[in-house]
Amino acid sequence: MAEPPSSPVEDSAIADRMAPPPMPPSSPTPPTPPVPLAASVPTPLTRPQPPTEKLASAAPLPSDDKDAAASSGKQAPPTQSAALAPQPERPGGDAVGAPQSNADLKPIDLSRPFAERAGILTVGGRSVQLAGIVPTDPARSCTGPNGKEWPCGTLARTALRSFLLGRTITCDVPDPEWKGSITADCRFSRVNIGDWLARNGWAEVAAGSPFAGAADEARKAGRGVYGNDPRKKHQSTLAPEPPKEDPLNPI
């Protein structure tokens, strides 16, 4: 038997019973405070640097510099090894008559040397200039403290020849088989010949010479070229004039 249709009022009541219970009202959410904005700081601009490997590979090698210089006609910059290489000594940098390093010298005996002038010796066609000495020109003339002129250069050479007569001296030379002229220290026994010349005033000394003290001593004492004619009574070496004829006592 069919059920009678329900009324609209009943349908509304049934719908109300089946509906979920209402949710309690929620509390209102407080508003979020605004976040202060930080002051903007300008960022400095930096130029990007190339990697070290690229810089090292980009640097030209010495051979590249030479090739580039050859193609462009310009001189290549010096390399580090070339800058550190020892440079040759400039000629004329040392004092006049300065000997070489003692490590490069060898003693040699020279028999019967001949004095070409006070300061230069000759042996067998070779010559030795005494170190630290300025050779005295044989043609030099000196005026002594007494105002008289005398041939000091000739007498200086004669004095050295007398000192060397018949003797064998020892000289420190770079090569025992040298040719031409060299500068060396020479001595007889324990007497340095350069010091002997300076101490007796027969030669002047070069700048920086170890014989400067001996030369000052000779200058103060008036020896050699700093003094008067050392010949006895300054007599002439020429032959005496013939006696005059006496008419009352003819020769």
Image (tube, rainbow, N blue to C red):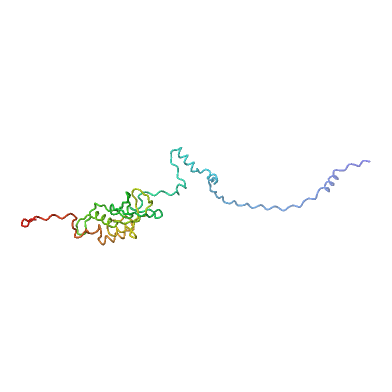
Image spot of residue 44 (x, y percent)? 53, 48
Which residue occupies the extreme top position in the image? 71
Image spot of residue 185 (x, y percent)? 35, 55
Quadrant location, the N terminus: top right
Identify which residue, 146 or 121, lies in the foreground: 121
Identify which residue, 249 or 195, lies in the foreground: 249
Which residue occupies the extreme left position in the image? 248
Q: Is residue 207 left or right of residue 65?
A: left
Q: Quadrant of residue 193?
A: bottom left
Which residue occupies the extreme right position in the image? 1
Q: Is residue 6 left or right of residue 72?
A: right
Image spot of residue 62 (x, y percent)? 48, 43
Q: Quadrant of residue 189?
A: bottom left
Quadrant location, the C terminus: bottom left
Image spot of residue 171 (x, y percent)? 35, 55
Q: Quadrant of residue 72?
A: top left
Q: How many marks?
A: 0
Identify which residue, 121 or 29, lies in the foreground: 121
